[in-house]
Image: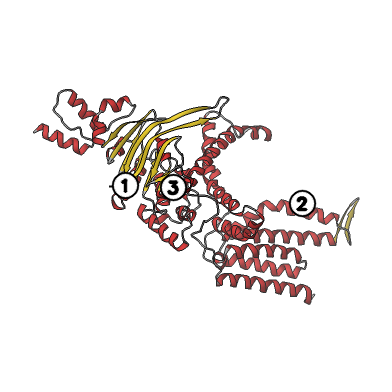
Amino acid sequence: MIRDITIGQYVPGDSLLHKSDPRTKIILTFVMMIFIFLINTYWGYLLLTLFTALMIVTSNVPVKFILKGLKPVIFIVVFAGVINMFTIGGRIIFEFGFIKMTYEGVDMAVKMAIRLFLLIITASMLTYTTTPIALTDGIEKLLGPLKRIRVPVHEIAMMMTIALRFIPTLLEETDKIIKAQSSRGADFDSGNMVERAKSFIPVLIPLFISAFRRADELATAMEARCYRGSEGRTRMKQLRLTRYDFITSAITAVFMAWVLAMQYMVF
Amino acid sequence: MSIFFDVQEVSFAYSSYGEVPVEVPALENVSAKIDKGDFVVILGRNGSGKSTFSRLLNALLVPKKGIVLVAGKDTSNEDNVWDIRSTAGMVFQNPDNQIIATTVEEDVAFGPENLGVEPSEIRKRVDEALETVGISQFKRNAPHLLSGGQKQRVAIAGILAMKPECIILDEATSMLDPVGRREVIKVLRKLNREENITIIHITHHMDEAAMADRLIVIDHGEIVLDGTPQEVFSNVDKVKSLGLDVPQVTELMYDLKKQGVSIDRLPLTVDEAFEIVKALVR
């Protein structure tokens, strides 16, 4: 059961997005996210939605995956929408006691919902089309300049890699401990929230102890393989910008220009 | 043959920092020379000091007294540490706790990356190493999806990619099933014969010990027996008194010998025993 959790959710593929350099994708994702917040016309949103749909279709990421990713945010979107609808002043649609709903409020709520959905899809396209290791390599390279102000960039990236490597191992271990404790009569499924949370203490303690033991052994193994930080270290896989990065960036730029033109010139 | 490891009158003790700091001795005045290209198995019960001995050989531990020379370099000199560790690689007991990267090939590349090898050269070494241990087909897999034997072979490939002269295995087969053990042993023998890589293998399995060039038995921090498997296992009573077993056939033939059957050379394998029995029956 617990093994089904996958973090990063990489979907293997051979599309333009898959072939682009992680650095290009990270930067474009950030630019796109800011851009989504700058746009406030329905024409703009229509174009952005088309662009997002284009990304999904060309990258071959199953739509089911994307919808599943949106599920947890529906609550936030509805909640924010309701607050927007009833708190923003303007032309009144109907009034009941102190509750009033305005045109401006509804307008805001819809735009906010579209924005949030687009944001989440854009951000998750990054992890769907980039392997975790490429992502950490990209982050390490992009944060490189921060080394000068003594930010331990290499160490952060190494920690991320090790964390990603050990997620499945620790999940497996958690599963084992849960089974071991269940066979000794531990009950994880009954009682209220507090009781249930408490019943996980006998799982967490052995898990932590074993994680520390693993960390110790891993550190020894890394030292035995001559690990001594980033100094003098090379990488087998070099990140290289290719024509794919040029194409991806160009398409994104053209789309953004189009959306801006629609927003400021046509209307 | 040249001497690869030269251990001279070495003592080591672990410091434990409880309420009263105490020194727990692990090795007492141990000396040994190991030749290049040898396949050495180290035996000993738990807590005998055999792991400590292996860690002294690649500068993970530095002796409190005495000198350890690896290919002529002193392990207590800080400047030599990285050279020593890249010439004498180490495989550990738990396969899960020594794999660092999220794919097999990235993990094999970890060692040479640390040594600052050129990217194209790393690529070449990684492919060669994976080929040698026979797991090329899994190179893009996540390590947690492999079997125990495959994981240990990834660990061996990770060391091979550093171009070592020696591989030290600290109970590397003890968590594996028989199939996994066989896979690892096969790779070790191949490396020893074809690439002349010195192997130091710590194990509890007597059948693995029987095929070594040399056996070293450690007990209570001292080397108590040292010789060819034939020589060591001939001392059946002594080996048993150290809390170790001898191979089953050896014990059987030893018992027969005690009963008065004339056997002058104790066999270590079933095949050898078969030849002896055949000669006797005739």
Indicate the quadrant containing the C terminus of chain A: top left, top right, bottom left or bottom right: bottom right
Q: Residues within 10 Å of mark 3 (few under 14, many from 20)?
A: many
Q: Bounds of the magenta span?
A: B80-85
**Residue at the extreme top:** B259
The residue under the point 39% across, 56% down is B136
Asked if the stretch drawn in magenta spans residue B84, the answer is yes
| Residue B268 point in image, percent of width and height | 23, 35
The residue singled out by tag 3 in the image is: B85
Indicate the quadrant containing the N terminus of chain A: top left, top right, bottom left or bottom right: top right
| Residue B97 point in image, percent of width and height | 48, 43
**Residue at the extreme bottom:** A266
Residue nearest the viewer, comparing A260 with B172: B172
Residue nearest the viewer, comparing B161 with B153: B161
Q: CA distance from mark 2 to mark 3?
A: 59 Å
* Host chain of mark 3: B
Q: Amino acid at mark 2?
A: Phe
| Residue A44 point in image, percent of width and height | 73, 69
Residue B36's label in the rendered image is: 1
The residue singled out by tag 2 in the image is: A79
Q: Is the stretch drawn in magenta largely helix, strand or loop?
A: helix
